Image (tube, rainbow, N blue to C red):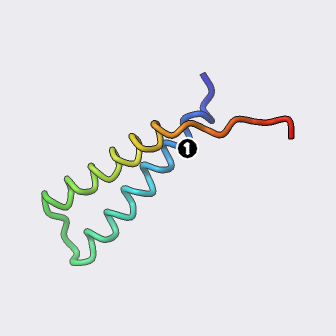
Amino acid sequence: MRIATYVKSILAGLSAGAAAAVTAAQDNAITAGEGITIALAVLGAWGITYAVPNARKTDA
């Protein structure tokens, strides 16, 4: 198991969560609905990133 294989997914989740959190915090308060949106953004990014395989190295 290599850490590099998971870095893409972790960074995708962090960036999606950060983007949702910054948008939610514009009014200086995060409601329960906004918290759920942040969590769903992270989970969605992880799921989509997991579903898309890494590019294969070619001998080109």
Question: Which residue is depicted at the point 25% across and 68% down?
Answer: 24
Image quadrant assignment for residue 48: top left
Residue 47 position in % (x across, y down): 39, 40
- Residue 32, position as x, y percentages in the image: 13, 57
Position in image of residue 9 (x %, y %):
49, 42
**Location of residue 36 with respect to 51 vertically, above or below:** below
Name the quarter where the C terminus is drawn. top right
Which residue does the image show at 56% across and 41% down from the upper left? 7
Number of marks in the image? 1
45 or 58: nearer the viewer? 58
- Give the residue furthest to the front: 60
Taking 19 as reference, is 35 above or below it? Answer: above
Q: Is residue 58 above or below residue 35?
A: above
- Place residue 27 in its image quadrant: bottom left
- Image point 19% across, 70% down: which residue? 29
Q: Is residue 6 above or below residue 14?
A: above
Q: Is residue 25 left or right of residue 13?
A: left
Q: Which residue is mark 1?
A: 8
- Closest to the observer: 26 or 48? 48
Q: For this rendering, which residue is in front, 49 or 21?
A: 49
Q: Secondary structure at mark 1?
A: helix
Residue occupying the far right of the picture: 60
